[in-house]
Amino acid sequence: MKKSIGDNMIPKGWTLERGLELIKKCGYDGVELWLGERPWFQMDTSDVQVRELRRKVEDAGLAVSDVANSLDWDENVSARDPRIRERAMRHVERQIETAQLLGADAILVVAGVVTEEIPYNEVYARTVTGLRTLAEKAATARVKIGCENCNSEQRFLISPREFQQFLNEVNNPWVGIHLDVGNIHDTGFPEQWIEMHGRRITRVHLKDVLRHRGRSGDQSVYTNIFLGDNNWPAIRAALDKVGYDGWLIAEMEARYRYAPDQQFWDTAAAIDRFTAAKF
Amino acid sequence: MTRRTFLYAAACAGSIRARMREPEFRSALVDLGSDCVLRDSLAGFAGARPGAIKVSAGQELEHRQECLFYVVPGAGEVDDVLGLRLARLVHRGGWLLLESAAGFAGEAAFRTQREMLASRFGLAIERPVDLRESGESIVPYVDYVWPVKVKIRDFSRVVPVSCERSEGIGAIGGRQVAVRRRVGRGVLVFLGSPIGPALAIGDADAHRWLNSLMSLAARG
């Protein structure tokens, strides 16, 4: 398995080059690029600039593990407003295009956001429709769409069976799940999600979770690998069981207040131990 | 001679090995009745092997000598009388998959099963263990190394088994819970962690394990 970390983790004020150098020095194999997050990768970044971005990544001795985005929370394929929905479709299409340019074969999307205003069933129907359309473009580009399980933040597809049913209805091998093992909180167990989705897992996000906190307070429920309540040996064994040998991508919410680069080192070491199953 | 008797006699003709080479060799699912303490395990095996003959543990078993692969799912109490019948089938060249569910039966059932396994198969099993009783976080899979390398979810309570290293085929948390042993001309496969429930929910690895075992048995 190869390890990666998001460019959204690069400390604010750092250049991309400096961030990539740190990522390489810490022993990562790749970087997850977030469309819409940092100045170097926006919707108006041209194809030429995207190719230049790839060159910088490769010059640093890294590969692009996948293309994520930070735009889905404001522009989702499940939105009621057709104009917002169109923008959402456009940025996911751009992810697919840039993934091709960057030499990656997977993207991450947050598909469907349920709110007090937009009910679950409505979100479900529109999300399935949107993903079916996007899947055609993904298939042509040979880029897999991984729908992330942001369970409690999306308030959508909370259980692994719901997620399975959703993927069954989308019914396209180019659409799978980008599984975040930290996002399941106290609604389940990541190792069971891994077992149920198996070959449909496009990528894995790693972080730990403090189950007892819930999500009602102002404190993050997320923490660094091995500091929370995830059963890491079980997660490792489940990945082995389903034959997952792809990218493991660190995605941390809580950042180190001081010496922010230390989080890159600590996380790389934790992923190495996880991969080696040395618990 | 009735048609049924003729078919039975024909099925029994020839050597066991020759019959095992047949593409669809006969297998039997032994229902222990009330001594099958995990009915969902029985259902799991029945679903996985729809062609298997269903037999009860009584006299019927003696008349099923044409079968070469016997599965006893969810076993609680297995007394010496039944043990003797099963042992005879194995000695003659049959394969016996005995799935212990002693962790879900009472102390008396466990003792009876332990005595039967010791006397008829020379196998020593230990008291059932509740894997989560210690409160420690465990890796919830039994690692099987034979006949195929797979991980199958544990079913909470396991029956550890003492055996030669070469006989061990499945372990969890450092405990050997599955064993294969050659007995006479046949083979005993003992499972101390039930896999029937995993078969019932469609676990691909559990099905692969069972299919591999049956293929091996069919090849003799």
Image (cartoon, rainbow, N blue to C red):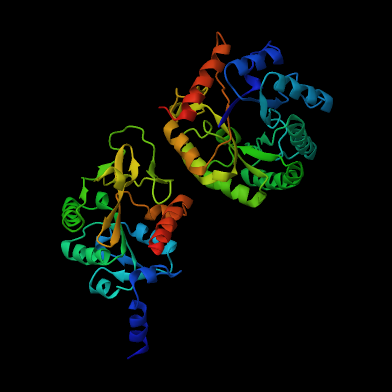
Q: Foreground residue, A38 or A60?
A: A60
In-front residue for pair B58/B7 = B7
In the image, residue B202 sits, relative to residue A90, either above or below, namely below
Picture quarter with the C terminus of chain A:
top left
Q: Quadrant of residue A205?
A: top right
Q: Nearer the viewer, residue B116 or A15?
A: B116
Q: Is residue B44 above or below residue A222?
A: below
Q: Is residue A53 left or right of residue A116?
A: right
The number of numbered badges drawn on the structure is 0
Residue at x 58%, y 25% (from the top left corner): A251
**Image-based side of A66 in relation to B144, left or right:** right
Q: Report x, y in % for residue A171.
A: 66, 51
The image shows residue B208 at horizontal and vertical percentages of 46, 54
Is any atom of residue B217 visible in this view? yes
Q: Position of residue B182 (x, y in %)?
A: 28, 56
Q: Quadrant of residue A177?
A: top right
Q: Residue reaching furthest bottom? A: B1
Q: Residue at x 25, y 73 (%)?
A: B62
Residue B143 vertical position relative to residue A74 in the rendered view, above or below: below
Q: Position of residue B101 (x, y in %)?
A: 28, 53
**Direction from residue A202 to residue B190 in the image, left or right:** left
Q: Is residue A225 visible?
A: no
Position of the N terminus of chain A, as image quadrant, is: top right
